[in-house]
Image: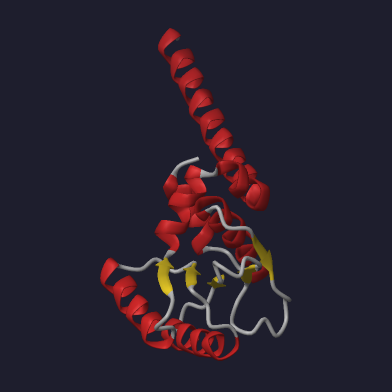
Amino acid sequence: MTQNIAEAIIQDEENSIRFEDFCREVCQKVDGVFLISTSKTYDQGRDAKSLDPKVNAHVCATLEKKKLAAKIDADTKHLQSTSLPTQVIYCTSVPLSEKAIDEYELLLRANLPQASVRVLSAQQVAALAVQHPDIFERYYTAELRAIEAMFLRLEDRAQRADEDALRLALL
């Protein structure tokens, strides 16, 4: 799997619960901090949290595309009012420039002054997917199989075209 394939799948994601669970698991693996999922409704602006009182880590994940800044602002303000996290990773399925990431991280720091913050856009989440393909494949098996089937069909067509060309050459 390439990063481009992973990024295309992430950008096309429509299942927020699956995206949240994937982000929780891959962030847990990368940071080495055990994270549990929060409730799927009324999640209090967080999608995963640590149980370690020394590392009050939280993961937020969103598929919001049109009002991303408003979503980040609302989530982190609510998170500050309920949790006082020391570490926040905010994952989005939207591709962002480094300038945009820096601006969103400034917003997170303004709302969560005590916390270490990171924003991971579609590109960074895809890079983590490539580094941890076992996790990505567990959540996105159907999409990967569909892409694989498409490539096999294209390969089969190309092979048949080569065979047809060879037949014509032999005539």
Residue 93, position in %: x, y? 49, 67
Q: Say left or right for 104 vs 126.
A: left
Q: Residue at x 43, y 65 (%)?
A: 120
- Residue 152: quarter of image: top right
Residue 155, position in %: x, y? 52, 30
Foreground pick, 95 / 71: 71
Q: How is the image coloured?
A: secondary structure
Q: Is residue 25 above or below residue 153?
A: below
Q: Residue at x 44, y 19 (%)?
A: 165
Q: Is residue 133 visible?
A: yes
- Residue 99: quarter of image: bottom left
Q: Is residue 142 visible?
A: no
Residue 75, position in %: x, y? 53, 85
Q: Where the C terminus falls, by quadrant?
A: top left
Q: Residue at x 37, y 81 (%)?
A: 109
Q: Residue furthest top?
A: 170
Q: Is residue 170 above or below residue 99?
A: above
Q: Residue at x 47, y 77 (%)?
A: 65
Foreground pick, 143 / 38: 38
Foreground pick, 100 / 141: 100
Foreground pick, 127 / 115: 115
